[in-house]
Amino acid sequence: MLLFLRVFACHSATVHEEAILAIGALAYATGPDFVKYMPEFFKYLEAGLQNYEEYQVCSISVGVIGDICRALEDKILPFCDGIMTVLLKDLSNSQLNRSVKPPIFSCFGDIALAIGENFEKYLPYAMPMLQGAAELLVVLDQSDEDMVDYGNQLRRGIFEAYSGILQGIKGAKAQLMIPYAGHLLQFTEAVYKDSSRDESVTKAAVAVLGDLADTLGPISKDLFKSHLFHVEFLMECQDMDDEVRDTASWTQGMRNQAIVS
């Protein structure tokens, strides 16, 4: 690990990318024991997350946060204020290449899964960002293939964020998600009606409906009854690949459980 950290003294974006990827693999291999390296590694991770000019370094740094979250779980908590502050700044930075932004949303989900109900303190900052990104999708140029592809990446990132946050908050503090549930369902309905969505977006959208039902339980009954698009959406998924079909079946089970509770 010390050898990897010395690599950051070299002023080469490619070398930094490789070192960050290697450290992510090390975190995965060492699991919770990786926490002993975090105080020293964090300053390099923070620098990578703020490297707007060499955006590939920033993008890889975002991805490594997911690896570290899965390795450390709630042991990452002492570093979350610093990580969330930089990620929120990245989302607001117009200079940062747009391709980095969808993985940042996914990263919110990874952090929430790792720290559970401790994610509560970040909800007032993360949720407006998710809602703002969802609204941005309405004005994307659908005639531009690159923008359609970016739109799908952004949708998937938003849904992955919501799924991670819903699963993380599930339990005693589940009611914290009630104020955001209506917007999530409206966004999901808009995506359902959009023919440009790809299968990965469909799977993520269907999964988040299941997570919503699973987390809110009987509280979600009225929400589903007032957003009936989900019935046709789940039926449509039966004609897709096994992965989407299995996700839809699980979601159907969660929804049925919530409605009959």
Image (spheres, rainbow, N blue to C red):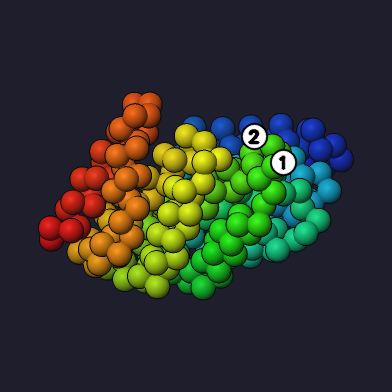
- Counting residues from the N terminus, which is met first, the one under dot 2 or under dot 1? 2
Q: CA distance from mark 2 to mark 1?
A: 32 Å
Query: In which quadrant will I find the C terminus?
Result: bottom left
Query: In which quadrant will I find the N terminus?
Result: top right
Identified at 56% across, 32% down, the residue is: 25
Q: Please, what secondary structure does the residue beneath circle 1 have?
A: loop
Q: Is residue 129 visible?
A: no
The image shows residue 193 at horizontal and vertical percentages of 47, 48
Identified at 28% across, 60% down, the residue is: 224
Residue bearing mark 1: 144
The image shows residue 140 at horizontal and vertical percentages of 67, 52
Q: Please, what secondary structure does the residue beneath circle 2 have?
A: helix
Marks 2, 1: nearer the viewer? 1
Instruction: Give the total number of marks visible in the rendering.
Output: 2
Identified at 47% across, 34% down, the residue is: 199
Q: Is disc 2 in contact with disc 1, using a CB cutoff of under 8 Å?
A: no
* Closer to us: 207 or 58: 207
Above/below status of 216 relative to 149: below
Residue bearing mark 2: 21
Sort mark 2 into few (<14), some (14-19) or many (20+) by Cα contacts within 10 Å. some
Q: Amino acid at mark 1?
A: Asp
Question: Which label belongs to residue 81?
Answer: none
Q: Is residue 251 visible?
A: yes
Residue 37 placement, left or right of 205: right
* Closer to us: 70 or 196: 196
* Closer to us: 122 or 254: 254
Residue 158 placement, left or right of 204: right
